Amino acid sequence: EAGVAQSPRYKIIEKRQSVAFWCNPISGHATLYWYQQILGQGPKLLIQFQNNGVVDDSQLPKDRFSAERLKGVDSTLKIQPAKLEDSAVYLCASSLDRVDTQYFGPGTRLTVL
Amino acid sequence: GDSVTQMEGPVTLSEEAFLTINCTYTATGYPSLFWYVQYPGEGLQLLLKATKADDKGSNKGFEATYRKETTSFHLEKGSVQVSDSAVYFCALIISTGANNLFFGTGTRLTVIP
């Protein structure tokens, strides 16, 4: 069974630029999560989707971050414009349903200069 | 609020040594507890879990017991191997919530031959 796929694996941008990350969850998984992991910290949930609807985006900085899962499968996370403090690893995870085990992708490491 | 406090690292052990990584939690409801592991260059993987008090999770020689009286979920292994070198994260989910994982800050374990 294929795992959660993410791309790109690494991205370096300058502050005020825009960036987008892509996630393809495990086939059949209805729930998709985006986490932000700052160096030396544990992952923090940014947004959770159930199919193509948002369940929880209370920790998403909506002035600069946006995410979508239009067809209930793939998802994109965008930052516009980026700040230095957005440097982190962005993790995507999926689960069969909201109460099931979450499976994580390898992450995208973002460096904002 | 809900949180996880994890033993700070890094931890360096010799092969075949005994491992304990402490984890305590604060939760308003009845959480499920998890240990995730992140091997170098890989994504987070579920190591073990426990969903109610006195449950013991185990996998790959690792064990952790859900102790409600001490609000703890310490990770143990009797004899570590070099291949156990990784970062270990304690996490919780509130069972009545939105399946949001709250992570500790992680403990880096290095096992030397």
Image: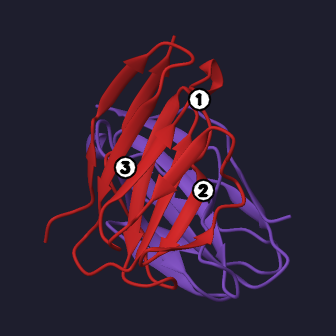
Q: Is residue A81 left or right of residue B24?
A: left
- Residue occupying the point 30% across, 62% down: A74
At label 3, the amino acid type is Val
At label 2, the amino acid type is Leu
Q: Which residue is mark 2?
A: A45
Circle 2/circle 3 CB separation < 8 Å: no
Q: Quadrant of residue A100?
A: bottom left
What colouring does the structure picture have?
by chain
Q: Is residue A64 left or right of residue A3?
A: right
Can the viewer see residue A68? yes
Nearest to the observer: residue A75 or residue A35: A75
- Residue occupying the point 67% across, 38% down: B8
Alpha-carbon span between mark 1 and mark 2: 14 Å
Q: Are marks 1 and 2 on the same chain?
A: yes
Residue A58 against residue A71 in the figure, above or below: above
* Lower sequence index among marks 1 and 2: 2
Judging from the image, what secondary structure is the residue with disc 3 in?
loop
Residue B31 against residue A81 in the figure, above or below: below
Residue B21 against residue B73 in the figure, above or below: above
Colour used to depict chain B in the structure image: purple
Chain of the residue that carries numbered disc 1 in the rendered image: A
Q: Position of residue A2 (x, y in %)?
A: 15, 65
For residue A86, the mark is 1
Q: Are marks 2 and 3 on the same chain?
A: no
Colour used to depict chain A in the structure image: red
Q: Position of residue B51 (x, y in %)?
A: 59, 86
Judging from the image, what secondary structure is the residue with disc 1 in?
helix
